[in-house]
Image (cartoon, rainbow, N blue to C red):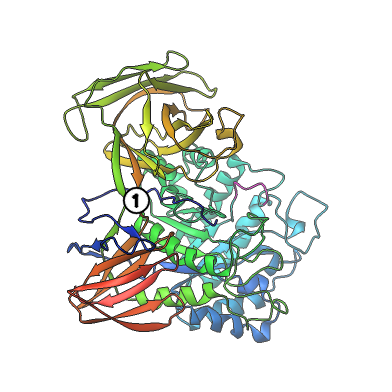
Amino acid sequence: MKRHRPTTILVLILACLLLVSLVPIQVPAAPEPIFAPKPEVAPLDDAPFGLNTHLATRHPNLSTMHEPAERVEETGIGWAREDIHWWRIQGRSDTWDWSFTDQAMQELILRDISIVGVLGHPPGWATPYTRDDPSENSFYAPDQALFVEYATAVVERYGNYIKHWEIWNEPDNPLFWKPKPDSRAYTSLLQRTSAAIRDVDPDARILLGGINPFDTDFLEDIAEADAWDSFDILAIHPYVDPYEPESGNIVASTDGVRALADRYGEKPIWVTEIGWSSGPGDRDTIGLTDEQDQANYLVRVNLLLWYAGVERIFWYTLKDDIHNPYGLITYGDGREDYSELKPAFHALRTLNEQLAGVEFVNKRDLFTRTPIIDFETSMKWRLGNASNGRLKYTRVLPHEGHVGAQLTYDFASTNNDYVVFLPDESVPIPDDSYALGLWVYGDGSGNTLRIRLVDAEGEILQYRLGTVSAAGWRLIQTPVGESVAEWNQISKDGNGTLDFPVRFHSLILDDSSDRFVGDGTIYIDTLIAISGPEAYNFQLQHGDNAIDVLWAPISVRARLASASNTARLTRIDGAQQSITSQDQYLSLNLGPDPIYVQHKR
């Protein structure tokens, strides 16, 4: 989404940043800001970036399947998420045709690309629904015994080469589990299929079927049915398009599933689909994202999710569909045309080239963080709804200073329980703020903290700060620069967008699911406003060379500390140029296109 005001990503602040203010590029008289290095180095996971390839199900010609496989290889990915769909293999109950899946697996394995095999969608004959074509793809729930037979046959055939199996695709999505999502039915399928796979290959790793992480009810149903051990990897699909990765708060997309994992057992998180369409598509019917935006977001979302602790990330997808341009390659003259590469293709290739063999050092930003409510000064709060909660100041567990706040609640019903706290004093928000954050010490409930603001028009708007996770201090944040959904427009007489000047209205703790019943205590401290230029710097290391990845959604000019006389700047399309340092600083024009700077620290 193109911006008309600065917005920000919701990032956990893990360290004190030695940075000064960043000045917009249109103010040349002001001094340039400085990115200061931080020496701590942590290892980078091997080959974290992958691609949804769909060779077996979307490429129509066996004899030319090497052509898309060659394009996959050119991207430099280490992992492919490939459909091994039932309908493609067993179009008739008495016939097994492995030709397309054999060819697709062969092409990828020969190129040393690891595979996640997606076990899904049945032919019409294998479901109770009678109106689908018996031999073609159906999204109706399958006959489970027959599905287990098919999955067993697949793993017996490819288990020597494929060790990761994703059971179904988006079972919580009504498009892909008809007539409607059914957590009990999927849980049964997951348990039966994973057991069958492990009987064939005890070393296999099972992935959950790529769920929506912004609503965890489906996942909680699986956990409560004692099926948490039926999978090894939490696969999620955290689409936020058409918003940018930062304003869409992509780094907070794992919060809800992590809260459940705190209760039921830690698991790696993989994003098996993420993407933006470069024009009108299913999620963006207007087409707010163009091809260059798509390329920029590809780099930015991969880095942000990786930093958020996601172990593997798979871009969706290799090639455009005719009315859904999420691919790296245009639809062109049809499904066999791989000639027209989009900027995102070059961006993924450059990302893999630049990050091969690097170690992570640090992530930094240039935000200005201003305390709005620090709880050191006494201020009265009152309840805005029922008497099922209390907020009081306490010295028991402050995050900083001497005083924080203790928030207790009691959600006794399976209705939508929540508690609202309003300050008696009016609290202004700085006019240049584009995000708000709150320090929270959680109780593992997975409940949701929200904030309400009142703007210049008197409109009250609500924003989701984030999920209450396990014990330990953590900063949760929300951008406030974009328009809000209708259900978050608490007063209905405005434009749905925050118009400054703005004041803090209230803090809300909401049950994460209406099914949640229980009481608890959390601690909060220091509500902050985030402003200043929005710029990002991922510091990496490759041997003796430093590699910095930098971008700014709104153009700014900055300086980067460097011990090199000259450095190599690489753009996301792979184009390179030399830049010269002055007084041990490199001057850089930062914009929405990420750049890679290789130099010496």
Q: Left or right of 198: which side holds 396?
A: left
- SS of the residue at dot 1? loop
Q: Would you name the residue on which mark 1 appears?
A: 532
| Magenta segment | 171-175
Position above or below: 306 against 143: below
Tell me if I can see residue 555 in this picture: yes
Q: Position of residue 147 (x, y in %)?
A: 64, 56
- The single residue placed furthest to the right in the displayed view is 131
Q: In the rendered view, does 18 fall on the left or right side of 457?
A: left
Category of crowding for the residue at label 1, using alpha-carbon neighbours closer than 10 angstroms: few (below 14), some (14–19), many (at least 20) = some
Residue displayed at 16% across by 28% down:
402
Q: Is residue 518 or residue 25 the one in the foreground? A: 25
Residue 177 in the image: state x and y as whole percent: 66, 49
Residue located farthest toward the top when viewing the structure as drawn: 387
For image coordinates 39% across by 48% down, the residue present is: 10
Q: Is residue 450 left or right of residue 15?
A: right
Q: Residue at x 41, y 63 (%)?
A: 555
Where on the picture, by quarter, is residue 136?
Answer: bottom right
Asked if residue 173 is among those painted magenta in the image, a careful observer would answer: yes
Residue 204 showing in the rendered view: no
